[in-house]
Amino acid sequence: MCGIVGYIGNEQAAPILLDGLAKLEYRGYDSSGIAVRDNNEDTVVIKAKGKLSELAEKTDNGSAVKGCCGIGHTRWATHGAPSETNAHPHVSNDRSVIAVHNGIIENHTEIREKLLRQGYVFRTQTDTEAVVNLIDYYYKKYNIGPIDAIAKTMVRVRGSYALAIMFSDYPGEIYVARKDSPLIVGITENAAYTASDVPAILNRTRQVYYIGNLEMGRLTAGNVEFYNLDGDLIEKELTTIDWDAAAAEKGGYEHFMLKEIHEQPKAVRDTLHAYLKENGKGNTVNLEKTGISEEEIRACSQLYIVACGSASHVGYTAQYIIEDMCRIPVRVEMASEFRYRRPPLVRDGLVVIISQSGETADSLAALRHAKEEGLKTLAIVNVIGSTIAREADYVMYTYAGPEIAVATTKAYSCQLIACYLLAIAFGKARGLVTEECVSEYLEELETLPDKIARILEDKERIQWFASKFANAQDAFFIGRGIDYAVCMEGSLKMKEVSYVHTEAYAAGELKHGTISLIEKGTLVIGVLTQSEIYEKTLSNMVEVKSRGGYLMGLTMSGNFNLEETADFTVFVPKTDELFAASLAVIPLQLLGYYIAVARGQDVDKPRNLAKSVTVE
């Protein structure tokens, strides 16, 4: 999605805005722009189509634009083609109101029609211009202040938005508002910042406020006030971001995605250790900080795991593990379907929402639906203070740190760890997992970071194999059980960064139509980490090979007979088969990455994708 940055203080604003926007490039965009005000002078608006470098060149990296107050934006076109005209910031007819906007205004057409009748003229095709002029309309018609004008607008519009707004009558102030699209405010002694994500301002401040739904803010140099929809002042908690600025930099790696793949041992270890507690006999799982009690766990008769994309693949893995370990029914639901299908829900069920950003629109809507139905909700999220984290009944944070690449890797791995810990805690609370088993499971989980690091040491082998298939048109992933869930994630990683058409199939379904797609040279990746069904998946691979497919096999050390069938075999260290996904996914992440690099793709910013999907 688009990026927002705002600054007010004593320094020149434009270079700060450009620097912040550069740190949001990973979110995807097709144009950019800034608006900067120099004291009582008219606000300068500069836009450019294409890369942010075009805007930087127009402004001499910002040094050519005077003023200490400004807002900036990177746009990903929704309403209106990518163009300099449609780029943000947008201005009201007389330039008295200027704004940038993330999200989608669903009733922008009727707002336009209303304003056209009032004599307003529209110069762009965007939904944002309708909002800017509506704010201007209320501001002038009722002769009210900015907060009241924004509040009236928020009541009138439907959809999602994060807004940063400047008024010509208030030169030393920036106003912000949000509904369903993320927006934060950072503060220092002499300055205030706003942004759509933490990395944009992390090198400036680590003191951050998270703006709540249907809330507004007024920023001045070194100060911020927050308001509810009634225009009343509200108090908000200041959050200290414990990432450092270096965590959001490449650190010598060619791409953020490769850096984040290599950060997985630490991220997994940090997430694991956040929920362990010494009990005198060893470690046990401690969920106190999540807020859920053992009594509530025992009372739960059904789990619903709701997520999108890679997070849903975590859910499918968790389904196999929790049902096996805890004997509790688990349903995995795509959030975008769950919110509209409206399935009958068991009242003593628990809805688990998994989201890296904690702002995913469909997952948030699913959470709210579950709460309306009277169910308790548990969020597994990576971003402290995010909307899903605030609205869920219980929160289990992952400790992946900032994830910049659009294609998730370390956040996915941390979500897996969180689900393993939930399974162990549920099993123990329900009397199905003994203290001895808990200790054994946790000892095995403690070995995962080092085993992931060992897999990464062999990455050149994967790179060599990827170079052989850089020109592949299709690839298929097959597996059973947990291996099938891993295949879904491996397939997604490859398609989203390399643009190779890939599909994941349950291996047992091959003969029900899928095998007709196999022809000579077709790349097929088989994942075989589950001993009980190893031979069955191996037989499926033999069927593929007999039809000319080129086989890559992925299994645990010791299954050396796979080399007799597969053309290329990758071995991962042995671990408990319930936790095999954490190791098996690593070579598939690397495979997707290296194929994308070999094809010359922009790995961190794949086309048409956004890091945080906050609109439908």
Image: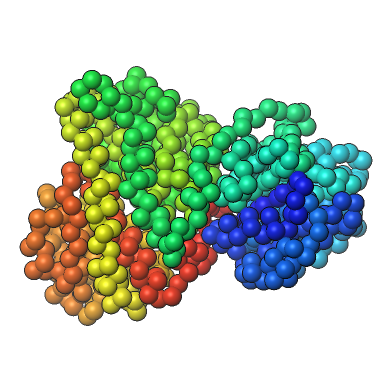
Query: Does residue 548 sit above or below 325 in this rendering?
Result: below
Tally of marks: 0
Residue at 62%, 29% (x, y): give it: 237
Please name whichever residue, 6 or 534, is drawn nearer the observer in this view of the structure.
6
In the picture, measured across the screen, residue 117 lies left or right of residue 348, that is right
Q: How far across and how far down the image is residue 604, in percent?
A: 47, 63
In the picture, measured across the screen, residue 501 lies left or right of residue 109, that is left
Q: How is the image coloured?
A: rainbow
Please name whichever residue, 14 or 225, is drawn nearer the observer in this view of the structure.
14
In the picture, measured across the screen, residue 287 lies left or right of residue 89, that is left
Residue at 60%, 45% (x, y): give it: 182
Is residue 523 in view from this perspective? yes
Please name whichever residue, 368 or 222, is drawn nearer the observer in this view of the structure.
222
Q: How far across and how far down the image is residue 429, in percent?
A: 27, 23
Query: Does residue 568 sit above or below 302 in this rendering?
Result: below
Please name whichever residue, 544 or 389, is drawn nearer the observer in this view of the structure.
389
Q: Quadrant of the N terminus?
A: bottom right
Residue at 67%, 59% (x, y): give it: 18
Q: How far across and how far down the image is residue 14, in percent?
A: 73, 58
* Residue 325 lies in quadrant: top left
Residue at 18%, 46% (x, y): give it: 575
Q: How far across and how far down the image is residue 24, in percent?
A: 58, 56
* Residue 345 lies in quadrant: top left
* Residue 497 lies in quadrant: bottom left
Is residue 70 in view from this perspective? no
In the picture, measured across the screen, residue 289 lies left or right of residue 152, that is left
